[in-house]
Image: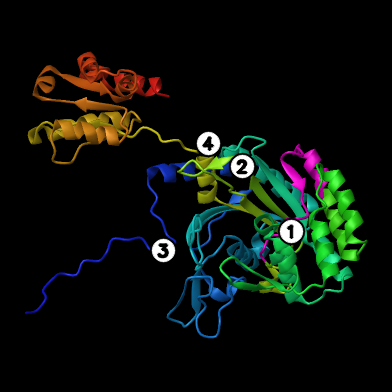
Amino acid sequence: MTDQTEFRPEARAPRGFQDRRAGDIRAERAILEAVARVYESYGFEPLDTSAFEYADALGKFLPDADRPNEGVFALQDDDEQWMALRYDLTAPLARFAAQNWESLPKPFRRYATGTVWRNEKPGPGRYREFIQCDADTVGSARPEADAEIIAMAAEGLEAAGLPRGTATVKINNRKLLNGLLAAAGVSDPGQKLGVLRAVDKLDRLGPDGVRLLLGPGRKDESGAFTKGAGLNAKAAEAVLAFTAAGSGDRASTLDNIAKVIGGSEEGDAGLEELGRIAQALKGLGVGEDQALFDPSIVRGLEYYTGPVFEAELLLETTDEKGERIRFGSIGGGGRYDDLVARFTGQPVPATGFSFGVSRLAAALRAAGREAGQARRGPVVVLVFSQDDMAQYFAVAGELRAAGIPAEVYLGSSGMKAQMKYADRRNAPAAVMLGGDEIAAGTVTVKDLDLGRALSTQLDDNAAWKAERPGQATIPRAELVGFVRRILEAGE
C-alpha cells in the first residue's frame, strides 16, 4: 500500500533568525527615531545602501577559492560575480564613499540604520540577522572628529532611554598598543592581531586567561585549545600592565599610559591624539562619567587604525528568571583610515560608531527601561450583523479620519470573543453599533482602558460586572470627541 500522507513542513524559524512582534518593533523604532534626531542635530545626513555588496568589497570576509561563505551569506550573480549580504554598515559606506567621492561634501558626515547579516554560529542573544545604527565621518583626520562621534554616541544612548550614569563610552587608541609591541620587538602582523584578540577578551577571561592567550595559548572548560599570540613572558606582562593603566579621570589615565608605553614614536602619536580628544570632549560638555579612557579596550576588528571606543551598560540587569546578567558592550567603533583606500589606493581618514539596535532594546528591557513601551492598539468596532457592515466601516472611517487608529472586527465569532479580541489588541475602546443604536443615531462605547484599571482594583468580579465601568451610549456625532477623551485620559 502506497503511503499517501501529505508532506507537512515543520513550522520553524531558521537558527539565528527571529520573528519580532509589535512590541519589539516599536521598541526598536523608538530607539532609532530618538538616535536619528541626535545625529541630525549634529548635521549628519541619512544614507541607505543596498543589502547586497559584491563580496570582494566587504573587506573583513574576502571570498575563498570556491565560495565566499565564511562569515557572510553569499550567492553568485548571472555574470559569475559573488554578492553577499552586508555584515555591517561600515564596509558599504567605504564602497559608497569611494564610488562617489568627487561629488560628496568633504568631510562626509552620514548616519545609517539597517539590517545586517552574519553567517556565524548563533547563540543566546547572538543572531545572524540584526539591526545596526551607525554614524560616521569620512574625510577628516582630526582627533576632534573622533571626539564628536564619541559625544554623539553618549548623547544618543541617553536619548534611546539610558539616563546619564547608566552607560559610559570607553576610549583607547590602537597606536598605544602598537607602540608598546614595537618596543617589545613584536612586528609580525599576525602576532599583533593575536594580541588584539586576546586583550579583547579581558572582560570575559580576566588577566589570567588573557595572559595565557598572549603566550602559548589557552584550553577552555570544554577542552578546546586556542592558540596564543606567542609573546614572551616580559612582553605579555607589559601588555597586561598597559591594560591596567586606567584611572578615574581622563587626565590621570593619560599620565599612567605615558609611563607604561615607554616613549615609542607611534605610542606618543596615540597619546597626543587622546589628549586632543580629551580637550574636545571637554568643549563638547561630555563629562568624565559619560566617556573615559580605558587601555583595555581594543576592539576585535582588524580595520581600526587609531582611536577605538566601546559603549558599556552599567545598569544592573536581570533575565526572565530574575537572575542577574551582565550585558557589557552595547556598541562600539573607532577610526579606520585605510578602509576607503582599499578601493582608491589613496588614504581617506574615517571614524564612526555603531550599536546593535536589537541588543540595546534587549538591554533596556532587562533593565526595566524598555523604549517604546507597549501602547494601546486601535479602537475596535464590533460586528452585530452582516447587513450592517457598511455602518461599521463608516464608523471606523470617521475615527481614522480624525487621526484615531480603528478597525472593524473581521472574524466570525460572537460578542464575547470579539470583546476578548479587543482586549488582546490592547484597544482603548470598543464601539458597539447594534440595530437599536443605528435606528436611534447613537453608538455605545466601552472604555476598555478604564475597565482594565478598575478590574485590577476590584476583587469581586460580580461587583465589576455590576458597575459596567466606562460604558456609555452617546449620539453618533459625539463619537470622535468621546473616544479622544478616552485616549487623553490614558496618556
Kindly identify which numbered label has been placed on residue 172: none
Check contact, mark 2 vs mark 4: CB within 8 A: no
Label whose residue precedes the other's in the sequence (2 or 1): 2
The three-letter code of the residue at mark 4 reads Arg
Kindly identify which numbered label has been placed on residue 369: 4
Identify the residue shown where x is 67% and y is 59%. Answer: 205
Image quarter of residue 303:
bottom right
Q: Which residue is mark 1?
A: 207
Label whose residue precedes the other's in the sequence (3 or 1): 3
Does 177 appear above or below 77?
A: above
Residue 24 pos. (x, y %) = 43, 45
User: Could you give the CA–CA distance between mark 4 and mark 1, rounded to whole angstroms?
Assistant: 33 Å
Residue 424 pos. (x, y %) = 28, 36
**Callout 4: helix, strand or loop?**
loop
Q: Which residues, given as a range, are shown in magenta?
A: 277-301
Does 276 appear above or below 488?
A: below
Does 300 appear above or below 471?
A: below
